[in-house]
């Protein structure tokens, strides 16, 4: 029984270091600009309301902005540890604060190493970024890119300086999980997207929103709330509903031990909400024993949905939804998608499908069409970091390749590339489009999935071109035709992935769906192996 004694000793040692736990640790992180120290509703009643919101949120770590003299009072009422830098930004922590790791200007950034109950360490930052112009007050906004980008211009250089300072400051803590939370005074490209243009009226790739994701950080709120809803998501401003309502407060995180499980905006209190900013709270699961998988399997599908009009020419989005849901795919490329087009009842099809399936959605339009936009969509169970409509050479109609950078659960990023090439018999336009896309794909470093309606057969030079740079998911010889759905006679829909040495591709199944569209959907299992 000597082995049993040593096993028990070993387990007790691990338990003492926090390496054994009955379940992963849960952490509630909050960011909140409390508005002039929370005193807008009174010197004493305001901060008390701030405390009440924080208590109701059950936050463990709080990134506060506009602390302005109320920090110690609030921290004492919570029974938390407190770290203040200058007058603006502060940290309130249920856990011990081990070290001040602040960087950049004192007014804009404060950081701390905190010790979690399992004795693991986490870096937590509270930040505040400036803005250059007023575009939120009633009547001040013009929905043109120049004025919008100019108003939020000053937030980007400050965030880059903060990010770079954090990278240098944490060099002695390699691999430590990091949360950066605060008032960014800029919006997100994940909100101002083509999918949500009916809500925001303009597509904006906000430079500030790219700074942290470039270094592997993820927007925790959008990750667990994939459907854009401007009113539900907004943090500016619950006190002034006539102003422009925007999401400008964020909780970003990095580190494989952290997984966001839920995230919400808090903007109400029975006695009266005390701030002009809503608070954001994310519940993280922290498991320091987790190991990133060496390989990740995902179900990948492509489907030309014919703007939700079936072989019977009846517009029926619920029938299309049912067909897509049956695929049970993690990543889906959709072709022939309408956004606010008259023929499809002005429905925002990519947003609606994403909402119904609770998936992240991207949309790219080929051209204006019948009062709206006609193009393609990508749906993903995994967060989408960035969307690029890659313009292809002109054909009989304008064409793009819709490219989404997707964050996988193992912290890798891949590109999902959706295509719908020119359709006429003469392949010169189609081949020119394929050639332009091939050159782009050869020049970029990320693993990619290529899928869609290629409008060309397996023996064509178009398909040969893609086989020269990527691996194809083969179809069964006796079930390879995808068009038309009722009596398929052509194979024109395909799935690829590259680089070949990173992917194992299962055979492609052509799904026997005969009515929802004029194409049949295709689906396969893709396994991505780690690069290390």
Image (spheres, rainbow, N blue to C red):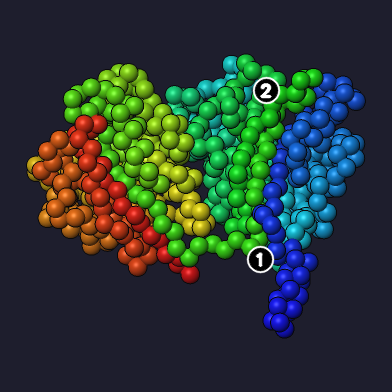
Looking at the rendering, which quadrant does residue 505 occupy? Answer: bottom left
State the image coordinates of residue 23 (x, y, percent, origin top left).
Answer: 67, 54
Figure quadrant of residue 370: top left
From the viewer's perspective, is residue 285 above or below residue 87? below
Using a 10 Å C-alpha cutoff, classify the residue at mark 2 as few (fewer than 14 neighbours), some (14 to 19) or many (20 or more). many
Residue 174 circle label: 1
367 with respect to 270 (left or right): left
Q: Residue at x 35, y 62 (%)?
A: 503
Query: Where in the figure is residue 34, as x and y percent of width and height?
Result: 77, 31
* Label 2 secondary element: loop
Looking at the image, which is closer to me, 511 or 396?
Answer: 511
Task: Please name the residue that numbered disc 2 is placed on.
Answer: 238
The residue closer to the viewer here, 478 or 141, is: 478
- Residue 28 appears in the figure: yes
Residue extending farthest to the front is 1
**Tag 1, which secondary structure?**
loop
Residue 121 horizontal/vertical position (percent): 74, 59
Q: How far across and how far down the image is residue 353, in percent?
A: 39, 32
Task: State the mark number for residue 530.
Answer: none
Which residue: 85% across, 29% down?
47
Q: Is residue 207 above or below residue 501?
A: above
Would residue 119 be found to the left or right of residue 521 on screen? right
**Left or right placement of residue 501 versus residue 199 in this view:** left
């Amino acid at each position: 029984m000597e082995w049993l004694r040593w096993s028990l000793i070993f387990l007790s040692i691990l338990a003492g270091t926090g390496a054994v736990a009955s379940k992963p640790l849960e952490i509630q992180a909050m960011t909140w600009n409390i508005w002039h120290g929370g005193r807008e509703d009174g010197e004493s009643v305001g901060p008390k309301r701030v405390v009440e919101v924080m208590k109701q949120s059950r936050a463990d770590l709080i990134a506060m902005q506009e602390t302005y003299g109320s920090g110690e009072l609030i921290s004492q009422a919570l029974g938390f540890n407190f770290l203040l830098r200058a007058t603006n930004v502060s940290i309130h922590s249920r856990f011990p604060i081990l070290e001040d790791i602040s960087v950049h200007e004192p007014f804009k950034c404060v950081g701390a190493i905190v010790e979690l109950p399992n004795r693991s360490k986490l870096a937590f930052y509270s930040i505040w970024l400036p803005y250059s112009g007023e575009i939120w007050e009633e009547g001040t906004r013009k929905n043109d890119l120049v004025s919008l980008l100019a108003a939020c211009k000053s937030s980007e250089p400050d965030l880059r300086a903060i990010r770079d300072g954090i990278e240098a400051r944490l060099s002695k803590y390699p691999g430590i999980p990091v949360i950066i939370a605060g008032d960014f005074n800029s919006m997100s490209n994940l909100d101002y997207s083509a999918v949500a243009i009916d809500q925001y009226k303009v597509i904006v790739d906000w430079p500030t929103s790219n700074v942290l994701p470039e270094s592997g950080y993820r927007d925790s709120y959008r990750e667990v709330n994939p459907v854009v809803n401007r009113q539900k998501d907004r943090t500016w401003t619950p006190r002034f509903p006539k102003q422009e309502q925007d999401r400008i407060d964020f909780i970003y995180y990095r580190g494989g031990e952290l997984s966001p499980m839920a995230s919400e905006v808090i903007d109400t209190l029975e006695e009266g909400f005390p701030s002009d900013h809503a608070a954001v709270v994310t519940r993280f699961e922290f498991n320091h024993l987790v190991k990133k998988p060496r390989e990740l399997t995902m179900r990948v599908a492509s489907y030309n949905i014919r703007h939700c009009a079936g072989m019977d020419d009846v517009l029926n989005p619920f029938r299309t939804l049912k067909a897509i849901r049956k695929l049970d795919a993690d990543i889906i490329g959709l072709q022939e998608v309408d956004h606010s087009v008259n023929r499809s009842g002005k429905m925002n099809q990519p947003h609606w499908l994403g909402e119904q399936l609770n998936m992240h959605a991207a949309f790219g339009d080929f051209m204006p069409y019948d009062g709206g936009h006609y193009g393609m969509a990508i749906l993903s169970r995994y967060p989408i970091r960035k969307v690029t409509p890659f313009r292809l050479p002109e054909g009989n109609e304008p064409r793009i390749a819709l490219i989404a950078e997707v964050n996988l659960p193992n912290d890798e990023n891949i590109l999902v590339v959706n295509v719908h090439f020119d359709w006429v018999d003469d392949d010169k336009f189609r081949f020119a489009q394929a050639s332009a896309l091939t050159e782009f794909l050869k020049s970029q470093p990320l693993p990619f999935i290529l899928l869609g309606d290629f409008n060309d057969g397996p023996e064509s030079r178009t398909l040969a071109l893609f086989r020269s740079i990527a691996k194809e998911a083969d179809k069964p010889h006796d079930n390879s035709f995808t068009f038309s759905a009722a009596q398929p006679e052509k194979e024109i829909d395909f799935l690829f992935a590259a680089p070949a040495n990173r992917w194992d591709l299962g055979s492609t199944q052509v799904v026997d769906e005969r009515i929802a569209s004029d194409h049949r959907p295709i689906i396969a299992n893709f396994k991505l192996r780690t690069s290390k």
